[in-house]
Image (spheres, grey):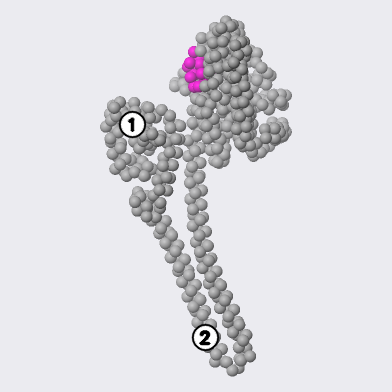
Amino acid sequence: MEAKIYCILLAIAISSPCFASIHYNTDSILKVLDAVIDSTAYYETTLQSQLGKHRAVYENSNDITRKLQEASFLFYKYRRFRVDSAMYFARERVKLTKELNDPDSIALARINEADAMKRLGRFADAKATLDAIPHTDYIYHSAYYYDVYFSILNSMSRDAVGEEEKTAIKELCRLYRDSVKIVNVKSELEIQVNNAEILKRKGLYNDAAELLLKTGKAHHDEMMNNAIYWAVLADTYEQLGEPEGAKYCYAMSAIIDKKNCNKTYTSLQNLAALLFKDGDTDRAHSYITLSMSDVKEANALSRLSLVGEYLPIITTAYEKKQKAVAVRRVLLIVVTSIVAIVLGVLLMQLVRRTKKLAMLRRQLAENNDKLHSLNEALAAMNKELEENNIIKEVYIGQLFNLCSNYIGQIENYRTSLISKLKSGRIKDMEKTLSQETTNSQLKSLFKSFDQVFLEIFPNFIENFNSLLRPEERIYPKPGELLSPELRIYALVRLGINDSTKIAEFLHYSVQTVYNYRQKTRNKAIISRQEFIDRVKTI
């Protein structure tokens, strides 16, 4: 399966706009990406098997040099796959290098540790770890050191508070990016990708794109397995206002990431954002959900906020679309049912009419020879036919009245349900709708709401309880994610402060919501207004 997918990918890439024309075969590359995603289990099983063998060698070896070699291999394999494991082996490398008392090896191990800290979202700790490394000749000529330092500063710049702080960090980013340019790196492709990033920071996007395309042609084989190259090219296209080129390159980068079991990527969520803008909500939702799953599985907290920017927007649009589809489906079923009933009634009438006409034809044929002697009988029969025509007209009129009444009943039934739903008359609806199904749907809705909310605000319960007296703190019951009180204030956190709207969403009475809110506010250690304001900022 892997070989087949790779052959398809290679064939598409060779005929891509980077090498042949200005046409971007986006649909084909997205199909390849979907096929690679479907094969994720194969790639991860293969990697896990490889990692298991090396871990066994590491754990069973008594030779420090061999253990250091295996720990290094495992760190670089885990750093984009399981960040916790990468941190473990980085620290193991620090211990082993101290035993060897090799300053350069110790420095590299410390850089590994800072790299893992950064991926865990511990930016300040990562920077402090790098700052504590003695600035030897090895460090001055280590592209890895500058890359990690740049990555840390770039992440910190997103969280900077003031413009002055952001400007200072961005200037440091520029200096460290320039530093990579003057030290040894692994390949010409990496040199030119770094140069393209420098051009982009200066706003020279056309020059950056031209450099990347030229380098890609010259280093085709290396470029085909370099996700960073495609991600940088995709961002360049996006800055130039070429969404098709950006989508194509993000897809290429994502394919390489998924094949290499990289879960700390940015390409797939960026691709999801572009697809969402183009109206491809289904695929965008699939990709952004997968991105969140991978980031959480890898425990790459540094990427969590990036995915979180897109997830609620895309998920909300997707759910809205699914609801609209469900409504259309119900309406289609209702209309189809009505049409089927009408056609059935008309068919029955047509059959009856056909049978009666056939009978009349037989009677007329049998009495043809007695025409002269049966004039009076024929006149009576003609009168009967006239009466039948009148009856048929009455039947047809009654049929349409019946259909009209049925349609009216359906509309009244629908209007009644809507009216009861809007007014919160749940008990009245139990006569028509299954209470068990309704409860199940509400529980499912609440569970989905709780899961998405806690993914966005993982520390909500802890922070919320910090506003209450210790003996009055609220926690969900076993098997629940949020209690009713917590769920109400989760909606307040999302900006829904009106008790009526909260009651409609949770299927509570307005009085119940008011009581919950009043009871909870009485437990607070701060004033009522300050409590509400603090909840909105958790």
Q: Residue at x 63, y 28 (%)?
A: 46
User: x, y (%) of residue 320?
Assistant: 48, 43
**Residue nearer the viewer, 240 or 181:** 181
Q: Secondary structure at mark 2?
A: helix
Identify the residue under disc 1: 474
Q: Residue at x 52, y 59 (%)?
A: 336
Which secondary structure type mostly characterizes the magenta part of the structure?
Answer: helix
- For label 1, the crowd category at 10 Å Cα-Cα, with few meaning under 14, some 14 to 19 and many 20 or more, is many
Identify the residue under disc 2: 383
As drawn, the residue found furthest toward the bottom would be 373
Q: Quadrant of the C terminus?
A: top left
Q: Residue at x 63, y 24 (%)?
A: 50
Kindly identify the amino acid type of the residue bearing the numbered disc 1. Answer: Ile
* Drawn side of residue 99 relative to residue 427, left or right: right
Q: Are marks 1 and 2 in contact (CB under 8 Å)?
A: no
* Drawn side of residue 86 relative to residue 497, left or right: right
- CA distance separating discs 1 and 2: 86 Å
Residue 415, placed above or below residue 40 = below
Q: Secondary structure at mark 1?
A: loop
User: x, y (%) of residue 106?
Assistant: 57, 9
Can see residue 147? Answer: no
Q: Quadrant of residue 360?
A: bottom right
135 in the magenta segment: no
Kindly identify the amino acid type of the residue bearing the numbered disc 2. Answer: Lys
User: x, y (%) of residue 522?
Assistant: 27, 32
Could you tell which of marks 1 and 2 lies nearer the N-terminus?
Answer: 2
- Which residues lie in the magenta part? 116-128
